Image (cartoon, rainbow, N blue to C red):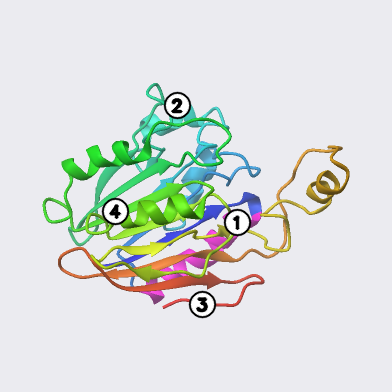
Amino acid sequence: MNILFLGDVMGRAGRQAITDHLPRLRTLWDLDFVVVNGENATSGMGLSGAHAKALLAAGADCVTLGDHAFDQKDMLQFIESEPRIIRPLNFSKAAPGKGARVFTTQNGKRVLVTQALGQVFMKRPFDDPFSALETVFRAHPLDGDIDAAIVDFHCEATSEKMAMGHWCDGRASLMVGTHTHVPTGDAMILSRGCGYLSDAGMCGDYNSVIGMQRDEPLRRFITGMPKARFAPALGAATLSGVYIETDAAGHASRIEMVRQGGLLQQSGP
């Protein structure tokens, strides 16, 4: 299978990048399945139902969320009616929606998508992500009823992401980090066939401070005082993520970092 994962969509610029590039890339790269992290797609904080529909219409098969999963209050209801939206497994036991789901592609392949939140340096405590994912992997082993498994690990620390990658090795086709909005350069295939990238980066304007217009973050760093709300940057966005190819056993056989449009050096399969 040919699978594409795209990092955190950041505001209007990020949504525009998805609309501009994803339909073309689905055809060009003969993609079987596409996952998009959409947790910052609405004004940089959360995802509205309307914007979720736009990401799905542009070619995403599944949209994952993150620690801002329900910042847009209509997502509390929308996620119950839209099975293609995945929230973190360990967000809250009372949270609506699902943290894992098996999808069937047009050619009949079954793909598990799941997401967990990390614990290191996060603003609020979350349940143990390893035990949460253990339950999912036991229910859907890679050598059982699924053809591929994708884990979106949404957290700050690269050490925690790398630990999760090794823990997922042999049980997932791809373990990719999200949340920091900064793409890393460590795409690799681990020893038991799991594709790995510490952070997919963001789909947003990189002439910014992690996707936000520069003035207010700079002011706060320099003076320690807020003056205005953060606002997403609106320049040309780079679509950032990772591409993998899987073999018959669901293991990654190829991995490539993806950068399309905007300011970053271009890359892809």
Amino acid under disc 4? Cys
Quadrant for the C terminus, please.
Answer: bottom left
Give the SS element for disc 4. helix
Type of amino acid at the residue the image marks with label 2? Gln
For badge 1, the amino acid type reads: Gly
The magenta stretch spans which residues? 13-29
* Label 2 vs label 4, nearer the camera: 4
- Residue at the disc numbered 4: 168
Q: Mark 1 points at which residue?
A: 14
Residue 77: which disc? 2
Mark 4 and mark 3: Cα distance apart in space:
26 Å
**Percent coordinates x, y for residue 174 in the rendering:** 33, 60
Is residue 134 shown left or right of residue 34? Answer: left
Per the rendering, the mark at residue 127 is none
Marks 4 & 3, CB-CB < 8 Å contact: no
Q: Local crowd at mark 2 within 10 Å, few (<14), some, or many (≥20)?
A: few
- Cα distance between the residues tagged 2 and 4: 31 Å
- Going by the numbered disc 3, the residue's amino acid type is Ser
Above-or-below relation of 216 to 169: above
Determine whether the residue tagged by mark 2 lies in a helix, strand or loop.
helix
Taking the spot 55% from the left edge, 72% from the top edge, the residue there is 260
In magenta stretch: residue 120: no
Q: Name the residue under label 3.
A: 267
Question: How far apart are the alpha carbons under marks 1 and 2?
Answer: 24 Å
Q: Name which of mark 2 and mark 4 comes first in the sequence.
A: 2
The residue positioned 75% from the left and 43% from the top of the image is: 230
Secondary element at tag 1: helix
Inter-mark Cα distance, 4 to 1: 29 Å
Q: What element carries label 3?
A: loop
In the foreground, 259 or 54: 259
Q: Is residue 129 above or below residue 193?
A: above
